[in-house]
């Protein structure tokens, strides 16, 4: 009787282990972002969320301000993050280049392409929570 119990325990252990291994999904590969020109192509999802959240706070806007959106017949709005159809996105890229250049030239602060270094001059310096800085309105 004991060999039968031992066999059942071992068979059950092997069965549950193989089911567990088969049920687990491999880790999702890092998302490759399309149409990145200033930021690194190796930007992680966490870095991208941090950077975009910083822009949202500094400009007081949401994703649709810079990114092209479409509305389906089911009233579902989708955002095309890779599209360059909005003028605001082009301007944002120019502003990022300008801020990176100013930080390097005047403050000797090298901003990496994942923006992990805290810049001295950044969006918030002029915008202060407004899409168009108040001095230009």
Image (tube, rainbow, N blue to C red):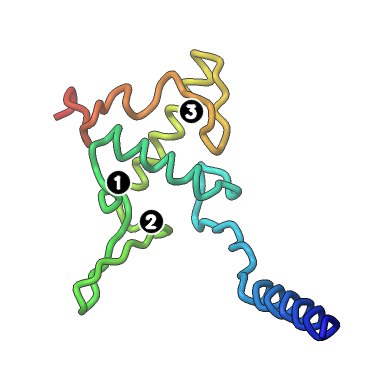
Reading the image, the residue beneath label 1 is: 88
Label pair 1/3, CB-CB below 8 angstroms: no
Dot 3 crowding, Cα within 10 Å, few <14, some 14–19, many 20+: many
- The tag on residue 72 is none
Reading the image, the residue beneath label 2 is: 84
Q: Residue at x 53, y 26 (%)?
A: 117
For residue 14, side relative to residue 34 (left or right):
right
**Considering only order in the chain, which callout, 3 or 2, is on the residue closer to the N terminus?**
2
Residue 85, image x and y in percent? 33, 58
Residue 68 location, quadrant = bottom left
Mark 3 falls on what kind of element?
helix
Residue 51, image x and y in percent? 43, 39
Label pair 2/1, CB-CB below 8 angstroms: no
Q: Residue at x 27, y 53 (%)?
A: 64
Mark 2 falls on what kind of element?
loop
Residue 47, image x and y in percent? 50, 42
């Amino acid at each position: 009787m004991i060999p039968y119990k031992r066999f059942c325990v071992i068979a059950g252990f092997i069965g549950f282990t193989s089911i567990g291994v088969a049920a687990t999904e491999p880790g999702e590969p890092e998302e490759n972002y399309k149409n990145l020109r200033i930021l690194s192509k190796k930007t992680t999802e966490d870095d991208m969320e941090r950077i975009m959240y910083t822009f949202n706070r500094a400009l007081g806007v949401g994703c649709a301000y810079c990114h092209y959106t479409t509305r389906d017949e089911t009233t579902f709005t989708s955002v095309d993050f890779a599209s360059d159809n909005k003028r605001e996105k082009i301007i944002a890229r120019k502003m990022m280049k300008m801020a990176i250049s100013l930080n390097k030239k005047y403050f000797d602060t090298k901003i990496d392409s994942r923006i992990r270094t805290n810049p001295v001059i950044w969006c918030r310096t002029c915008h202060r929570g407004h899409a168009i800085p108040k001095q230009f309105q």
